[in-house]
Image (spheres, rainbow, N blue to C red):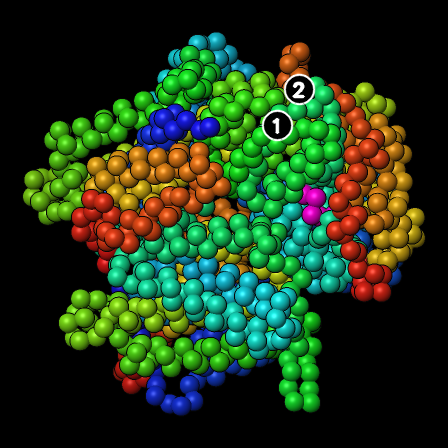
Amino acid sequence: MIQLLPHIFNGLTLGLLFALIALGFTLIVGVMEVINLAHGSLFALGAYFALTLIGVDPIADTAVGRWWLDQAIEIRYLTALVFAPLLAGLVGMILEICLRPTYGKAPLYGLLLTFGAALVIEEAIRVVWGSGEQYLQIPPAINGATIFLGTIFSKYKFFAAAFSALAVIGVWLFLEKTKYGAIIKAGAHDSEMVRALGYDLTKLRLFVFGFGAALAGLAGIIMVPIWGLRPHVGIDVVIPAFLIIALGGVGSFEGAIVASLLVGLAVGITGAYASAWSMMSMYILLILVLGFRARGLFGKASALEN
Amino acid sequence: MSKTNISRRRLLTTAAALGGGAVFFGPWKHNRVYAAGTDKPIKIGITSDASGQYANSGASDRRGMGMAIAEFNDKGGVLGRKIETVHIDTETTPATGSRVAERMITREDAGFLIGAVSSGVANAISQVAQKYGVIYLNTNSSSPTESGKNCHRVKFVWDGNGSNFAQAAVKNAIEAYGDKWMLLTNDYGWGHDTANATKKLLAKYGGSVEDEILVPQGTRDFSSALLKLQQASPNVVAAAVGGDDQKAMRQQVAQLGMGQAPAWINNQQDWPDVYGLPIENLFGVFGTTWYYNLDLPGVDDFVKRYQAMYTDTKMRVPGNVFYNGYMATKNLLQAIERAGTTNNIAVIKQLEGHKMSAEERMQHHDAYIDPATHQVQQTIYLATANTGTKDSDDMFKILSNSAPEDVQDLGAQDSCKLESYEETATFDA
Amino acid sequence: MITLSDISPQSRNRVNPQLLTAAVLIFSAPVWLPAIGLYQYIGLEIAIWIIYAMGFNLLFGYTGLHSFGHGAYLGVGAYAFGLFQHNIAVNLLGGLLAAVAAAAIAGFLVALFLSHRRGLYYALLTIAFGQVFWFSAIKLRWLTGGEDGLLNIPRPPIELPGLSIDLNDNVTLYYLVAVILLAALFLLWRLDHSPFGRVLQAIRQNEMRTRFAGYDVWRFKVSAFTISAMFAGLAGGLFAMAQQSAYPDVMAVHQSGLIVMMVLVGGGLVNFWGPVYGVIIYYIARDFLGGITETWLLWYGLMFVIMVMYRPEGVAGMLHMVKGRFVKPSKLKQLGV
C-alpha cells in the first residue's frame, strides 16, 4: 500500500528544487525578454567551478593546494557556494556582451545565440574537465538519510529544498523591496524611464544577465549532488525551466514559483502511482493549462508573444 | 586516432557554384594513390561515440582498439599490410550511426568497422554494414537484442549482455538474500529485456516479484521510486537502469544509505562510468567481464602496456570497456591472419565458433564466439564495492566467476536469425 | 534588417531561372559529389532534409510561427512509411502517401490545439507536443520498436508500367529524391508566392491587422502548420528509405532545434532559398569538422554564435548584400529585388 502523504511532501520538495532550477531563467526572460538556452550550460559550469574550488585539482600538489585541502570541507564547500556562482555570472556577462547585437531584433536571435553558446560551453567543459562522471564533495552534516513521516528522506534533499526556498525569497525581496529591484523591473518594460532616471541601461542588462547566470550556476552546485556531474548535466534543466515559465506565465515571478510546485507535485505523485508517466506528466500538465489559459497561470502581455 | 588521419589527407578546397552562386569549401579529398595489391593499408573505421551520453566510454573503447592496432603495426601489420584508422563521432545517435557507417564504407574505404556503446547506434551501423558486407564489431553494447533479434551475419558482439549477468546473479542472490524481489526497470526496450530475463530466472529458482517500478528514460530524481522501495522493503532489488539515469540513481541511493539493505542486483557497471567516484556510489552486486586486478597471468603486463601507451589519461588502469575494445580488435586482426585474406566471408568463417583460451583472454574460463548468435561467450564476473583497501583504483571486489556455459543467453538462439552467406554481399577490404 | 517581404520573387516568368539552376545542380550532383570529396549518401540525406527544411520554413519563415517540435512530424512520416511496408504492402507510392497522410493528421490535430496561441506560448506548446510524440515513439514498443527503432524497412522499387526500378543503390534512390525535391520546391515556390502565401506573410507581420482585414487567421495558421507537417512527413518517409529504419531520436527536442538552426543560418527568414543553404552548410560543416576533431561541436557552436552576432540574416542575407554591391541598384529594381 502506498502512503500518499510522504509522496506529497516529496513532490513539494521537488517543486522547490524546480523553482531553484528555473530561477535564473525566469529572471532573464522576465526582465530582458531573452530566452537563455545556455541556462543549462551555465548550470553545469557553476558545478564544475565548485568542483575545482573544492578539490583544486590543477594545483593540488603545490603548497597552496595542500594547505587548502587541509581546510575543513565545510569551509571549502561554502567558499565554492559563494565564488563558483560568481564565476558563472562572469561567463554570463561575457555572453550578454555577445548578445548585444541581437537587441531590438526578433527574440528568436537571442534564443539562437544562446543555443550556440550552450554548445560551446558544454564542449569547453569536456575539454577542460573531461567527459567522465565526477563527484562534488559535500559536508557530511548534510549527507545521509533521515526518517520523516515514517519514511526515509535524504538529508541533502532537505538542505537543497530549504536552500531553494531561501534563494527564491531572497531574489523576491531583492526585486520587490530594494531600489535596484525596482530599477530592474522598470528596465524590463520601460527602458526610457530607466534612462530618464539616470541609470545606464547597458550596465543594467549586463548586471541582470550576470545575476541570472550566477543563479543558474548556484542551482547547478545545489542539484549536482543529487543528479551527478557530467558535461551534459545541464540539458535536463532547460526544458523544465521552459515549462515552468510557460505554466506560470511569462513575466510573473509568483507564477513561476506556483508552477514549480505544481510540476513537482505532478512528478512526485505520478512517480508514486504511475511511475512510467512521471516524465510525461509535466508536458501533459502544460498542455492542459495552456489549453485553457493562453498566458499560463499568471502571465502578462510580453514582447515574446509576437 | 583521428589525428593520424589528418596527416594522410590533404586539404583540398574546392569552390563550387551552388544555388545562387554561393561559394563553399568542400571537405578534402583523398589524393593518395594507393599502390596496387598488398601494399594498400587495411583501413579500420572506428565508430565510437565522442559526444552524447556515452562519450566517455567511447573514448575508452577507442583506446582499447588503438592499443591492439599499435601492437600489430609494431610487428609489421597484418598480411604485410599496415593498419590505418579513421574515427568519426557517432554522437550516441542511431541516425548519425547510419550516416557515419555510409561515409566510412563509401568514402573512407574502411574495410572493417569497430565500436559501439549504445545499442541503438550499434544496431544502425550493423544494418548498413550488412548491406555492404562489411564486418562490424560491436565492442561494448550489452543489450540482449544485439545478439538476439537484431543480429547480423557481419556483426560480432563482444560484451556480456543483460541476460548473461542475470544468469550469473539471480540464483545466488535468492540463496544469499531471500526470495522477495522488487524490480526497478528503465521504461524502454533494454530495461524491459533485462527485467524479463530476471523475471524468468526468478520463476525458475523460486523467487517472487513483489512489484516492478518503471522509471522513464531521462529520470533524474528517483525519490518517488526509492520511497516506494523503502515502503515495500523487499529482500532484493534488481535494477535495470542504464546510462545517465543510472548515474543519478547511484548518487541518490548512496545518499540515502540504501545501498546495503535491501540487497541490490545491478546490471553491468562500466568502468569509465564509475572510475574516480566515491566507493559508496558502488552498491550491491553488479556484473563485469574483466577487471584489471584479476589474479591471472598476463593481466599485470597488460595494465603496464596500457599505462605506457596512455600516459596522460585520467584513468590510470584499464577497465572492461577498454578490454572489450582491445580484445575485439585483436581477435579480428588474428582472424584476418588465419584467413590469409581480407575477404569478408573468409574472415567471418574464421571468427564463427572461434575458441579463445582463458590465458589469451586473461579470464578464468575459455571463451568462444557462438556461431549462431555471433556473441562472445565468456566468463562473467560478479563484483561489489571494494571497501577494504586504500588503493583508490582498486574499486571492485570480485565475488564470483561463472563459466560461459552456465550463463548463456538462452533466448538469443531462438530470436537471432543470421543472414545466409549467400545473402551477404562479398567484400574485400 | 531585411525580411522575406523585402526580397520579392524575381520574376513572373513561367521558367524560373533559380529553379532551373537548382534543377541542374540537383540532377548533376552524383557526378560532382565525389569530385569535391563527398559521397552519395550524404547527398541523399541533404536532399531529404532540404524538403523538410523548405516545408518547415513555410511555417517558420513565412508565417512567423515558431515550431520547436517539428521533428515529431518527420518521425511520424518515417514510422508511417515503415509500418506501411511491414504491415500493408511493400509499395513505394503507398508508403509515401501513408507518410504524408499520417503527418498531416498528426499536424492537423496539434494545429487545432495550437493555433489560438502566439509567440512564446505557441513555441512552448510545439515543444510539449513534440515531446509527447517522441516519448510515445519510445514507449509504444510493439508498434515502433522502441529506442532501437523500426528496422529493416525495405526500399520498394519504383513500379511503372512495364518497368521496375530497384532503389537499393544510393544513386538511384537519390534520383527519386531529387525528382520529389524539385516538385516540392516548385510547389512551395508557387505556394509561398500565391495569395495564400501573402496572407501567411501578413500574419507574420501583424496577426491582428490581418484579422481586421477580414481573414480567418486561425484557419490560415492551421493550414500552414498542416502543410508544413506534410512536407516533414514526406521527408520522413524518404528518410526511412535512406536509412532503412525509423528512429525516435529525430523526434527529440534537440533534433527539432537543429532544423531551426539550419533554417536561420541559411537565411530562411530573408529568402526562399535560405533553408537550402542552411541544410547544405550544416551537413557539410558537420561532416567536415566531425572528421578532423572530436570537439567539432565547439567549433560549430562558435561559428554559429559569430554568425548570429554579425550576420543574423544568414547566408541568403549575405548573398543579397554581396549582390547589392556588384549589381547597380537600378538594375536590381528592374529585377524586382
Q: Which image quadrant is residue C204 in?
A: bottom left
Percent coordinates x, y for residue B270 in the rendering = 65, 32
Residue identifier under label 1: B181
Residue at 70% across, 19% down: B176
The picture places residue B399, in percent across and down from the top left corner, at 74, 20
Q: Neighbour class for label 2 at 10 Å: few (<14), some, many (≥20)? A: some
How many residues crowd mark 1 within 10 Å: few (<14), some (14–19), many (20+)? many
Between B427 and A244, the one lying in front of the other is: A244
Q: Chain of mark 1?
A: B
Report the span colored magenta.
Answer: B143-147
The picture places residue A131, in percent across and down from the top left corner, at: 55, 36
Residue C248 among those drawn in magenta: no
Q: Quadrant of the C terminus of chain B?
A: bottom right
Q: Nearer the viewer, residue B229 or B359?
A: B229
Q: Main secondary structure of the magenta part?
A: helix
Q: Quadrant of the N terminus of chain B?
A: top right
Q: Quadrant of residue B127?
A: bottom right
Between the C-alphas of marks 1 and 2, the distance is 10 Å
Residue at 84% across / 35% down in the picture? B405
Disc 1 element: strand
Q: In the rendered view, would you say C223 is above or below B315? A: below
Task: Kindly identify which residue carries mark 2.
Answer: B177
- Residues behind callouts 1 and 2 on a single chain: yes
Kindly tell me whether residue B233 is visible in this rendering: yes
Residue A142 as seen in the image, left or right of residue B117 = left
- Quarter-wise, where is residue B195 in the image? top right
Q: Is residue B336 left or right of residue A38?
A: right
Task: Please state which amino acid type lies under the numbered disc 1.
Answer: Trp
Residue B148, image x and y in percent?
Answer: 73, 49
